[in-house]
Image (cartoon, coloured by chain):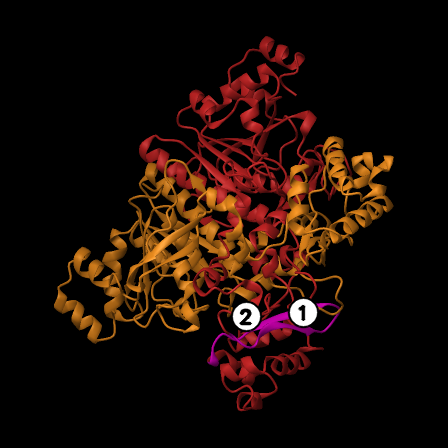
Chain colours: A orange, B red
Amino acid sequence: MGALDGIRVFDCSDPKGHFAGKLLAGLGADVIKIEPPDGDIGRSYGPFLDDQPGPERSLYWWHYAAGKRSLALDLHSADGLELFLPLAEQADVVLESCQPGRGRPFDPVALSEHLPELIVLSLTPFGQTGPWRDYAWSDAVGLALGGPMGSCGYDNIPGTPPIRPTEHHAGHISGYFAATGVCAAIYERQQSGLGQHIDIAMHECMGFTIESSAPWALYEQHPLIRQAGRHAGPQPTEPWQYPTADGRLINIFGMPRSEASWLALVGFIQEHGMGPNLSALELLDGRKRQLGLQQPTVAMMLADIAEFIAAHDAQEIYAGAQAAGAAWSIIRTPDECLDDEHWHARGFFVDVEHEERNRTVTFPGAPYILSRTPWTHGRRAPMLGEHTAEILCGELGLSRDELGALIAAGVAQ
Amino acid sequence: MSDSEPNTRPPLDGVRVIDFTWIVAGPTCTRLLGDLGAEVIRVENEQTLDSIRFGRPHPNGFQPPNSSGMFNWLDRNKRSVTINARHPDGLDLIKQLIRVSDVLVENYSSRILENWGLSYEEQRAENPEIIYVSLSGFGHSGPRRDYSTWGPTAQALSGLTSMSGLPEAPEPAGWGYSYLDHMAGFTAAAAITAALRHRRETGQGQWIDLSQVETGMALTGPATLDFTVNGRRYRDTGNPPGNRSVWPQAAPHNTYPTAGDDNWIMITCTSDAEWEAFCEISDHPHWRTDARFATLPARLRHQDELDENIGSWTAGQDGRALMQRLQSADVPAGVVQNGVELVLNDPQMKAREWTATRDHPVIGPHLTDGLQIRLSRTPAHRDRPGPVLGEANQYVFGELLGLNGARIDELQANGAMG
C-alpha cells in the first residue's frame, strides 16, 4: 500500500510536470497521464532504445512515465474537453502546466471553483501572474533565469560561461514542490473536505534552491563568484577537486572538523609515507584548516593532500578517507553508481519487466524508503493510449462505438 | 498567517515537528514544513550548535549564535529549545516531547540517534504514530552506512557533478552550491506530507529512511537507462555537453555573451518554428535558408558555426533588451541571473512580491524571501523569523510538557537543558 493509495491524479502536464507526476505515482497515487492523440512530446526525447527514435522507445519517457496510465485524449477539442470534465469530477487532483496566455484548454482556477473538492495544481514556469507569465521557456532558460546556473561554472578557464547542469533540473526542483503541495493539500482536505488551487511558479522554486546566493542577496546585496567544482562564494576559494593517479577526481570537501578526526585523516595519509607538513602543530587548530579564507596553513595542507591524491588510486583514497571519518568522494558518472554494492544492498536499483519486448530493464528507484508505505516504481511506462479504453469505456461508461468515433475523429487514441 | 476563519489555516496547521536537523539539508526540509504551517521545534544543544548559526553573512555584526543571516534565511518559521540529549534527564525530555509530536526529523550521521537511545523502535515506544525521518548520506542500511557526505560529495557520488561541465575541461564544473542538500530536504518534505496523509487515513506512523546520494541518483534516469539499456557509459559520447542539449536534440541551445562583463543569455530553439522565429527577429533571416542551418540535423552537425554566428550577433547587445526582443517573437531566451538580480531586481519576482520585510531581535529589520507553494484557500506563511537560541524553552517545558518552575530550574541546573 502506498501513502497516496486511493488518490487519483489526472496529469495534463507536459515535460515541466513529468517528474511531479512520477513522484505522485511513486507514492502510490493512480496517475493518469493525459496525452495528445499523437503522443506526449516527452516520447520524442532521447536517448532511445538502440538509438532508434520512436514513441515507445524513449528512455526519457520510460523513466518519467513509469507507473502512470496513458489516456490519449485531445483536450483542445470540444469533444475531448467535454469528456475531461466528468473525469475531473472523479479525480482528487488535476495537474496542469500550461502557461495562462498560451492557449490552455481549461482555466485551472475556474475548474477549481467549479469542483470545490478537487485539488488543482498549476505548475508553470512563472506562475499565474506577473509580466513574464507567458514567456517562452525551456528547462535551460528556466535554470538561467531562476538562479541555479549563475552559481555553476569555471573560474579557472577564462571566458567560459556559467554552466547549466544537465538533465531537466528545473522540472526536478519544482516537481518536489508540486508533490509536497499536493500532499499537504490532500492532508488538509482530509479534515476540511475541501480542495483548492495551487499556483507553483518553477521560477520561484528555483529562486529558493540557490543556497547561500539567497542570504547574500537578501542581507548584503552581494552576488557570488562561480568557481569550478565547488561553492560559489563572495570571494575566491581553494579547489576541492583533485586528480588521482588512475585518472579520476576526488572531492575533498568535508575536511575533518574535530582534532580526533583530523588526526585520523593525517594518520591515513602518513601511513602511505606522505603528507609531512600535515603534522604541523598549527593545523591541530580547526580554524587553521578552514577552507575558503585563503589561509597559508590551508595552502600548505592542500599541497600535501593534492600530492597524496595524485600518487594514489581513487578507490583507495575514497575508502581510506571515509574510514578515517572524512566525507571525501570519488566523482562518478551515473552509470558507475551501478557498480557500488551499497545501493544494491539497499534495493535502490529496480528491475522492471517490459513484457512485450521480453526484457527486464534496470531503473534508478526510490528517492526515499518509507517503511510502511513503500515507494513503488510501478509498471513500465505506458504505451500511447494504452489505457484509453479502460478509462473511457471501463470507468466513464462510454460504449466501444462512441470510443471508435472519437478515435476516428482524432480526438482520442 | 491566515486568520481564524474556518478552513483557511495553512495545510500543516496543528502538525508538530521535532527538528534535530542542522547545516542545510534537514533545515531545508523543516523550512518547507514551517512555511506550510507546521509547528517546527528545533532541538539544539549549546555544546554542539548548528555551524550555520555562525555562517556568513552577519548583516548586523557577528554576534553568534543569533546573528547569522544564513541561519535566519534557512530556519525561519521555527522555534528553538535547548536540550542535551546525552544527559539522562535531557533524553527523558526528548521522549516526553516525542509523545506530544507528530514528526521527528534528523540529518545526523547514521548511528547518532541510535546511540542516544532514540532508534525508531525506541521512538515508537513513546509514540506509536510518530513519523521518523532520518536523512543521512548513505542511509541507515547497507555496507557503507557509516560513510558520510556533504552536499558536494553526495553530488559527486550520485553522478550529478559529472553531468555539469564543458566537454573539453579537465574537470566538471559540477554544482556551485549544495544542490543535494536542498533536494534531499525537498525529498524529505514530500515524503513527510505523504506519510501524514497516510497517518490521518490509518493512524499508522512510519520510518522514512533517506540517503542523500540516492536522492541524487534518482535524478539521473535517462543517463542511467542509456547505460542499462544501451550499454553506453556517460563519458562515451563526449559528455558533459556544456550548455548544449544532447537530449532532447535542439540547436541552437547554448549561452551567448552579451554586453558588459561576464553577462550571458541562454537561447534555446527546441523546434523548427522557434528557430524560424529566431532568424526573423535576429538581423540574420538568411540563416533560415542557409543549408548549414536549415534543418535540425544540419544545425546539429554545424553547431560550432551556428554558436559562433549567434555569439557574434549577441555580443555587445544589452542582454535584457535582447531577451525582451527574442521573447516578443516567442523564442525561449533568458539571461543568466545571479542571486542579486534574481532575488532583488527581477521584475517577475517583484510583481509576485518575492521579498517582504520582517524583524529579528538581533539582525533587525531584514528581507525574507517568498513562498513557492501558493495555496488559494490555506496559504502558507512567512511570519516568524529564525529563532533565537532557546527562545521556546518556556513554551516547550512549561506549556507543552507541563513542568513546574522548580523542575525547570532543576533541569537547568543539572545540565539537561542547555
| Residue kind at label 2, given as amino acid type | Ser
Local packing at callout 2 (Cα closer than 10 Å; few below 14, some 14-19, many 20+) is many
In this view, the mark in front (1 or 2): 1
The answer for how far apart the CA atoms under marks 1 and 2 are is 16 Å
Q: Residue at x 43, y 35 (%)?
A: B4
Q: Is residue B83 left or right of residue B271?
A: right
- Asked whether the viewer can see residue A275, the reply is yes
Q: Residue at x 80, y 44 (%)?
A: A274
Q: Is residue B278 left or right of residue B52?
A: left
Residue B33 falls inside the magenta stretch: no
Q: Which mark is residue A211?
A: none
Residues drawn in magenta? B250-272
Image quadrant in which you'd find residue A142: bottom right
- Asked whether the viewer can see residue B100, the reply is no
Q: Is residue A389 above or below residue B216?
A: below
| Residue kind at label 1, given as amino acid type | Glu
Q: For the residue labelled by badge 2, is the local secondary structure a helix, a strand or a loop?
A: loop
Question: Where is mark 2, residue-wise?
Answer: B245
Q: Residue at x 51, y 48 (%)?
A: B215
Subunit that carries the residue with mark 2: B
Q: Which percent across, then down, holds residue B127?
A: 42, 23
Q: For the residue labelled by badge 1, is the local secondary structure a helix, a strand or a loop?
A: loop
The quadrant of the picture occupied by the C terminus of chain B is top right
Image quadrant in which you'd find residue B264: bottom right
Question: Where is mark 1, residue-wise?
Answer: B168
Q: Residue furthest top?
A: B406
Query: Disc 1 or 2, which lies upstream in sequence?
Result: 1
